Image: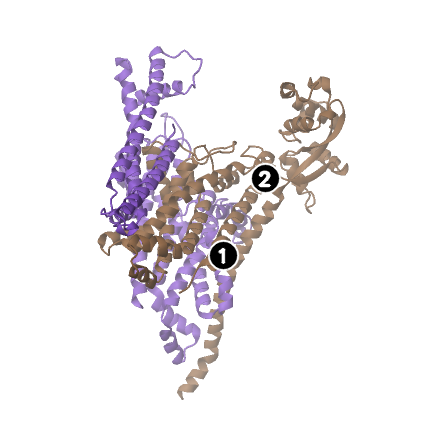
Chain colours: A brown, B purple
Amino acid sequence: MKTIDLVNKNLAKRYRKEKLFRAYGLASIGFGLLCLVLLFSDIIGKGYKAFVQTNVQIEVSFDADYLGVNDVLDSQQMASANFDGLLKKSLREKFAVKKRRDKKLAYALISSDAGYQLHDLLLNNPEWLGSTQKVWLLADDDLDTYYKSMDNAAGGFIGRLKEQQIGWIKKLYADDALRTQFNTNFFNYGDSTEPELAGIRAALMGSLFTLMVTMVLSFPIGVAAAIYLEEYAPRNRFTDIIEVNINNLAAVPSIIFGLLGAAIFLGFFGMHRSLPLVGGLVLTLMTLPTIIITSRAAIKAVPPSIREAAMGIGASKMQVVLHHVLPLAMPGMLTGAIIGLAQALGETAPLLLIGMVAFIVDIPGGVTDPATALPVQIYLWSDRPERSFAELTSAAIMVLLGVLIIMNTLAVLLRKKLERRW
Amino acid sequence: MSITTLIALVLVAMIAAFVMGRGRSRVLANATGRGVRSLNSLPFYYGMLTALWCGTPALLLLMGWLAFDDSIVRAIIVDGLPLAQQQLPEAQLSLLLSTVENIASGSYPDSKQLVYLQNAAEQLLALRATSQDLLALVLFCTAIIGATIGWLKVSPKYRARVKVEAAFKWVLMACSMIAILTTVGIILSVIFESVHFFKQVPITEFLFGTHWSPQVAIRADQVGSSGAFGAVPLFVGTLLISFIAMSVAIPVGLMSAIYLSEYAGPKFRTWVKPALEILAGIPTVVYGFFAVVTVAPFIKGSFAPLLGLDASSESALAAGLVMGVMIIPFVSSLSDDVINAVPQTLRDGSLALGATRSETIKLVVFPAALPGIVGGVLLAVSRAIGETMIVVMAAGLSANLTINPMESVTTVTVQIVTLLVGDQEFDSAKTLSAFALGLMLFVVTLALNFYALYVVRKYSEQYE
């Protein structure tokens, strides 16, 4: 038998194996992309509904005697007026309930914030005093969830709703007294135990302040360290130690930085818990290695001929670095910084350990106000049992991912636009 | 004046000193009649020098002041207290001082506090005010004196550039030292607290004990608070979840890398590679949420019954699978780099001998790239071990010693988070055990990283 026959005998089998191997590769990539699509569609599918809120139309008579208000512009009268009582009265009339238990069920359909809403409505429409008006009020989250899922084949999600309440909701629906509108609370409020009043404003501001501290500290320090290591440091053992150390720090789990923050910043320096300042410091230490490594790569990419040319016409070392190397390396450094900051923005674990997990209702106004961060808010909400919070969590994730996508796109564009190739 | 104002004022003074120093150098240069050329350095450097003389001592002083201010004030306050209070134990004394602090900040406006406490509070306020005024004054003087020294040093012969460049270099070096300081800080903080922990719990019990229940009983008859610190269930849980994650990430990541670098055309590559890398950019809290609301119910509701098994609602499998997906791009991009570094000549040689492409990959490229791939995989393992949010959200808290992926296990990182979140006292064994776990985590991941980076570095030198 000739060799060629031996080869030919196995050829079909070998080609089959070749095809199979190739198919495995393609399948792996397909699996990865499928996971990506699944993740995004799952989050978006759960979260898009949280961007609208259900409102209920109720007839309210702004009875001047009941409220004890004769001048709407008198803020003292308005503040002491019983709008909650007015709302409850209107609800009792609307659903014609007498028994204590039924009354409670009726009140539970409207958000606990609706009293303030009535207050604001009257303030903006002083002529309503003494008249009966149809007003749109914020619904409670149970009604909200039910109404949003009413079109499903299985019917609405009942949850904690009682049969009687569902009857009322169906009647409201038939009367066209239910509608959805854009959820402004989600972007204007801090955290709340009531899903319809919970928002991401406090967390977003907390993230912003934390990130500001991180940016202000980590970018200059990281760039300075990179310049030292690339342009100044002598090749010796000490420099080697710094280098190995930086590479290792980049791979240290983020939670370890949280431990560092808890022990050093909170324990040793006695800083307060939950502050964006402390969070920013911890995230600075965490992102520094990334920024140093990318900045070094950017400095390395500047050809030595530029340095030599500058030196040749009498520039000092500092002038070479500040006038030539740094401006040329800046796009690469900025790209690295943005990527590092995007990482810091999504980071949760270290912030948990320094106490940025508090229940924050007030919008923080600076780096020394107690705050939480967007990813931490997501973590906190994901634990809450109400179904509406699952929606809100997904919506918050959509916001977070949106910001991250913008940051990364910016980094890519910056690199494409400004980076020079020699 | 607040600290921020003081710092801002020092900076303003530095700018003023810069302008003055630069101006003086120009004046002196013009006086020689040869203009700027008579100067040793450019006027900019004389300005910088004056500014540095003005700002550096002042800022150093400010830092020192802030570091010692509180303890000095405290000592004076303690001195002013009645003798009986001065001799209280440390813990009670600091409680007393925080009461004084609260009175001073007006938290107890109408309460009838003891007279000596009220006096102490007044003294505290007075001392704080004095300290602030004194600080401002001293800073002002330092800045003026420094600026004057710098200003007097300006002369055409003075080598300002050399000095300024040396200062610049020192600043850069200090910045690169922060990385070292971070490592030292990590090591010190975990070791310091761990030593405290191991004084209360023997290290052998921690490393080899099989029962983990960190709730320490406050009363003798308290149920479920045995205070056992055997960390083996945590180690096993961590390894189990990491193993599941790696058995997803290694095959998928490696095959993706092989396909992308060996088969895919340039167009396919430019689109698919970044798309896969999006997976790496998604925050882990998002993966955690996905694991807990989508994957875990699916495993409990559909997957496990299909196999005739019973799954816990917080199964190790859910956390591991999702973590594996997160690590795919990590494995694939590291392997991709390594595979691309294999010289083309090796492939050409194999293909010329009649091997198919898959045979070339399996028999030539893969063995040649193996050390680098192993390095990459080790880095991925260290990432899986240290991953926190996915397991915190999806893996549960009960320390079961099991290797059944359908059951709920807990990991080292989960325990660190649960032990340290919320109110804590720094001296209880419960809190300290978190630092001991942190030490273990740090040592293991550091060893893995160190070895992996060494392997990758050595490998990449091999073909250069």
Is label 2 or label 1 in front?
1
Q: Is B58 rendered above or below residue B385? A: above
Q: Are marks 2 and 1 in contact (CB under 8 Å)?
A: no
Residue B228 tag number = none
Using the image, name the chain to which the residue with label 1 belongs: A
Chain letter behind tag 2: A
Q: Earlier in the sequence, mark 2 or mark 1?
A: 2
The amino acid sitting under disc 1 is Leu
Residue B259 versus residue B250: which sits nearer the camera? B259
Closer to us: B382 or B304: B382
Q: Is residue B98 above or below residue A268?
A: above
Q: Residue at x 47, y 70 (%)?
A: B263
- Residue shown at the point (46%, 39%) measured from the top left: A209
- Mark 1, other Cα within 10 Å: few <14 / some 14–19 / many ≥20: few
The image quadrant that residue A263 belongs to is top left
Count of numbered labels shown in the rendering: 2
Image location (x, y in percent) of residue A159: 62, 37
Q: Which residue is mark 1?
A: A413
